[in-house]
Amino acid sequence: MLYLDNAATTPIHPEVKQAMLPYLVDAFGNPSSKYYELATDAQLATSEARQHVAKLINCQPDEIIFTSGATESNNFIIKGITAARSSLGKHIITTNVEHPSVLATFHYLQEIGFTVTILPVNEEGCITTQQFQEALTPQTIFASIQWGNNEIGTLHPIEAIANICLRHNIFLHCDATQVVGKLPVDVTQLQGINALSLSAHKFFGPKGVGATFLRKDQYGIFPTITPLIHGGGQEQGLRSGTLAVHNIVGLGKASEIALQHLAQHQHKLDVLEQYLITLLRDTFGEHIHFNHHSKHKIPGIISVRFSGINNELLVKKLAPIIAVSTGSACSSSQPSHVLAAIGLSLDEIRQTIRISLSPYLDKEALDLFKTL
């Protein structure tokens, strides 16, 4: 089977698997324990992994907080920061193409008294800096803006938005789940980004582990934040619970590999994407339409509409030979809110599939589409 659903999840890289195995069998110590070798080995392993994740996004290792994944990271930051800053104001901003873990959290905050602005995107799936600027009020304390979209790949103007937030003392969180490991991310350069979410399984690491970047101030102190999970005080008191050492090691190794091959993989995804787009156009002609219009996008994510063909039926028919999806794996039971946001009708949404590529894919494998 040709696997083309990498935006949903990627397979574990062989080197990641090998790095994880000892911590599933013999090196089973709890890193919160002390003194004996099994514990200190686990401590060293998590410390090394933290350094690799930090290098991938260019931050300090102690600004990395391990979580179960980006959904938890999003909830942790959005709920924790808004609770801590509510005395300064209760206006918060996001967009209408965010991941469900962001939008659902914003809806929850609206129910408990926050004023929420959900910015509509244009037909390319992004907001403008002017639009963001005009949404600000004296009560604005927080914004969560997705770096890159998981269905159509569109990149928001994060650098410009970060600069606006920096000038206005607005806490900016970025869900960077689809961007980390595929494009350069430098939070030291982008000082306006206060927090960022990522998941290992989007760049060839294991499921069930991710990280939050939370920026410390010039004195090395975290912003005031209410933890999502209370307990034993792990992760500097911000995320309690016994660390899943094997998964954390996997995240660290995946981060190391991603950083080593970042430019090469980005180029490969660009090549594969252009090859597949040309192939699909040559094969299906006027019967297809691509939903992503901009070049400012995550490489390797293709949203394509097959006129007159139901996407669910198409995905099922392809399933024995090609794995693709109708959209986000996190909202597969509902018509895509992202495609609706860029102006597609319900019929057009139901004719759309998402193809997401891997840099480890051979270009010739895509020729399978010629036989359909």
Image (cartoon, rainbow, N blue to C red):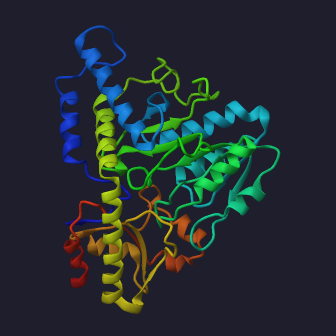
Q: Is residue 13 above or below residue 84?
A: below
Q: Nearer the viewer, residue 298 or 245?
A: 298
Q: Count the marks: how many?
A: 0
Q: Is residue 232 above or below residue 65?
A: above
Give whichever of 296, 318 is nearer the camera. 296
Which of the image's four quarters has the C terminus?
bottom left
Q: Please tell me in which quadrant of the rendered image residue 210 appears.
A: top left
Outermost residue to the front: 189
**Residue 280's spot in the image, x, y percent?**
33, 82
Q: Quick one: which residue is furthest to the top in this view?
A: 35
Q: Quadrant of residue 52?
A: top left
Give the residue displayed 49% in from the left and 37% down from the top.
Answer: 212
Determine if residue 153 is in view: yes
- Vertical side of 336 occupied by 68: above or below: above
The image shows residue 18, relative to residue 161, as above or below, that is above
Say which residue appears at 47% left-offset and 49% top-offset: 185
Q: Position of residue 340 (x, y in %)?
A: 57, 70
Q: Locate the N terminus and report the quarter of the image it occupies.
A: bottom left
Q: Is residue 206 in view?
A: no
Q: Residue at x 41, y 79 (%)?
A: 310
Residue 273 place in picture, x, y as percent: 35, 72
**Horizontal arrangement in the rendering, residue 25 relative to residue 286 (left or right):** left
